[in-house]
Amino acid sequence: EPWIAGPIIGPIDDSKMITTKTVGLTARGIEHVFDGWIVLPANYRQGADLMAAPPLTIRANSWGTIAARLVQSQVARNGRLPIVYGSLIEDGNRYVRNYDTWNLANNGLWKRLTELQALNEDGDVPGPDMSFRPEMAGAVDLRWRMLWGTSRQSSLPQDWVPVIDLTSAQGPVAGWSSIVAWEPATRVYAVGAGQESGQLVSMSDRRELLGLGMIPREHVMPDTSNDDWPLLQRRADSRAAHLSRPVVQLTVTLDARHQATRLGGWMPGHIA
């Protein structure tokens, strides 16, 4: 049986991970649980007609609150997962998401949360950062605290910003590498719900990039569960904005004993 201690650690099934001095454990985060949860408005009896069941509809004034309400609804349905919610709840009707019960293949909870992070609010504010942070709840109990970006600040709040100097021999960096994680595009097509000539399609064009010397390049993003054209257009605009800027991805190995990057002093999602 797997057990929970912040990361989710399964049974040891590889004899090579065990020596006379050490035991190697492979751990995954809470996304491993959410990968196995399907977004539904309720639990249905065997034989129920999911095609006729109503969708799960969530409304809020920020995408982060929609993410929190989405997690709340599925924890209430499945239970047995200790999660508390630590960011501002912004209820309202500014944004709405419908999750159809028949769309099981696309309704994985982690997939839907990742989808919300990729959105842009009003076309220029990035989708919300999210984090599930393990913490103690009493002397022996563990739980996760869910945090998310709000309509005013898409990034997560933090008390301090670690400064990581890649050039200092005395700093906390043990090694680093970089890659350019970018596939540029000057035009993006978002393909929504429907079939053949009745399929919903939106397009976002970044003509200003051609004036900067970029070679025309087109990109198609599928979103076949989406039947909301304004939302589809915002997603196309968001992807076009993302693909118009180069992204350099750094992989850094840090010394957890160093004061600047002490273990427990920073969390995934923090800005450095």
Image: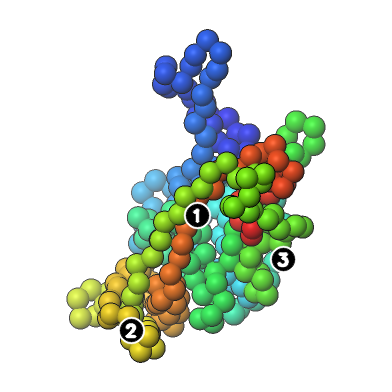
Q: Label 2 near label 3: C-beta < 8 Å?
A: no
The image position of residue 76, as x and y in percent, is 60, 51
Above or below, 121 relative to 165 = below
Residue wearing tag 3: 88
Above or below, 268 relative to 257 = below
Which label sits on residue 213? 2
Q: Quadrant of the C terminus?
A: bottom right
Question: Dot 3 surroundings within 10 Å: few (below 14), some, or many (20 or more)?
Answer: some
Amino acid type at circle 3 is Leu
Amino acid type at circle 1 is Leu
The image position of residue 212, as x and y in percent, is 37, 85
Question: Dot 1 surroundings within 10 Å: few (below 14), some, or many (20 or more)?
Answer: few
Horizontal side of 43 relative to 180 (left or right) equals right
Q: Secondary structure at mark 2?
A: loop
Q: Is residue 26 visible?
A: yes
Label 2 and label 1: CA atoms lie apart by 27 Å
Q: Nearer the viewer, residue 16 or 237?
A: 16
Label 3 and label 2: CA atoms lie apart by 43 Å
Circle nearer the N terminus (2, 1) = 2
Which label sits on residue 250? 1
Circle nearer the N terminus (3, 1) = 3
Which label sits on residue 96? none
| Direction right: furthest residue | 139
Residue at left offset 46%, top offset 21% = 17
Q: Label 1 near label 2: C-beta < 8 Å?
A: no
Horizontal side of 104 relative to 165 (left or right) equals left
